[in-house]
Amino acid sequence: MKSTRVIKPRIREILSRELPPELIEKLPKHWVRIGDVLILPLRPELDPYKHRVAEVYAEVLEVKSVLRKGRIGGEFRETNYELLYGNDTVTVHVENGIKYKLDVAKVMFSPANVKERVRMARVAKPGELVVDMFAGIGHLSLPMAVHGKAKVIAIEKSPYTFRFLVENIELNKVQDRMTAYNMDNRDFPGENIADRVLMGYVVRTAEFIPKALSIAKDGAVIHYHNTVPERLRPGEPFETFRRIAREHGYEAEKLNELVIKRYAPGVWHIVVDIRLFK
Ligand SMILES: C[S@@+](CC[C@H](N)C(=O)[O-])C[C@H]1O[C@@H](n2cnc3c(N)ncnc32)[C@H](O)[C@@H]1O
C-alpha cells in the first residue's frame, strides 16, 4: 500500500497539460500496487479522463495494468474491478517472502490483511496440521507452510482461484507439505484431524462453524473471522461460535481477538482465536 498526501509531481506535471485545473486536485493520492498491477481509487468527476489518467499513472509508477477500485462481493469474494489500462492483470506479488500469483482483476488480495498473513506465519508450528477452509490463493496458509513449516490442507471452492492456489504451492516449493482441494469445504470428509483451522471468510462465516467443529481435533485452535456491527461488540463474533459449539456438546475458549479492518461504516472485520474442547 502506498499512501501519500500529495499527487506525484510527475503525474501532476503531465496531466496539468490535459485536464481542467479543478480536476487535477481530485487525482488519486494513494493506490494499491499488487505485483505490477495498480488498483486506483478514482472519483466519478474523473470519468471522462479515466483511461488517460490510468495510462499516466501506469507510466510513472511503472506497472503493466491499472484497475479501478470497486467493491468485493459474492460467494467467491470476487473483485470485478474495471480495467482502465493494459490487458494483463495476472501478476506475482511478493510479500513476507511469499510469492502470490493471482489475477488482480478477479481475486481479492487485501493490503489491510497483511498483518494477519504475517501473524499466521508466526503462529503455525512445524508438523502441525492446518486446515484452511477458505484458502483463496493461499493468502493465510502459504505463510504457515513456508515459514511455519506446518502441514496444510487448503480448500478452495472457486475453480478459477483454485488454479492460482495450486500454482502458488509449486512457486513456493511446499508441495511436500501443502495439498489443495477444489471443493466446497462442507463436502470435505476429514474429521478430528486438524490442530488448527482457518476460517478466513466474512459475512456468512457462522454457517460454516459446524464443519469447522468436525474437522478440528480436541484442543485445536480455530482462527474464526467474521464481520461484526459495532453494536454487537465485544460479545460477537465469539458468542455465536460458543453457542454453536455448545449445541454440539463442545466447549470453546476465547484466546485472543483482533480487528483486521473496517469492513463497512460501523462494521468491523474481526478474527478471534478460539480453543476448542471436544
Ligand atoms: C475472502 S477469500 C479469503 C482468503 C483468505 N482466507 C484470507 O482471509 O485472506 C475467501 C475464499 O473462500 C472461498 N470460498 C467461499 N465459500 C467457500 C466454501 N464453501 N468452500 C471453500 N471455499 C470457499 C472463496 O472462493 C474465496 O476464494
Image (tube, rainbow, N blue to C red):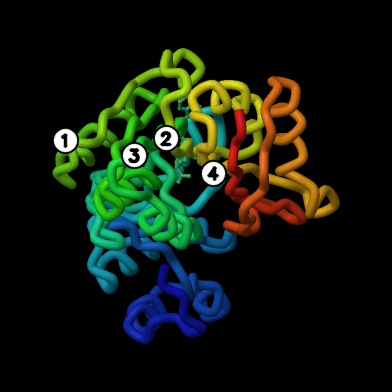
For mark 3, what is the residue?
A: 137
Mark yes or no: residue 89 visible: no
For mark 1, what is the residue?
A: 176
For mark 4, what is the residue?
A: 223
The reply to whether the C-beta atoms of the residues labelled 4 and 3 are less than 8 Å apart is: no
Does any atom of ligand 1 lie closer than 8 Å to the CB of label 2?
A: yes
Write down the quadrant of residue 210 in the picture.
Answer: top right
Distance, label 4 to label 2, CA atoms, is 10 Å
Q: Amino acid at mark 1?
A: Asp
Left or right of 177 on screen, residue 220: right
- Callout 1 secondary element: loop
**Vertical position of residue 117 compared to residue 210: above or below:** below
Spot occupied by residue 53 in the image (x, y as percentages of width and height): 39, 65
Distance, label 1 to label 3, CA atoms, is 17 Å
Write down the quadrant of residue 211 in the picture.
Answer: top right
Left or right of 275 on screen, residue 10: left
- Callout 3 secondary element: loop
Which circle, 1 or 2, is nearer the viewer?
A: 1
Query: Which residue is rendered at x = 30% and y = 62% of the image?
Result: 96
Which circle, 4 or 3, is nearer the viewer?
A: 4
Task: Tell me the quadrant of the picture where the N terminus can be found.
Answer: bottom left
User: Circle 3: is it few (<14), some (14-19), or many (20+) Cα within 10 Å?
Assistant: many
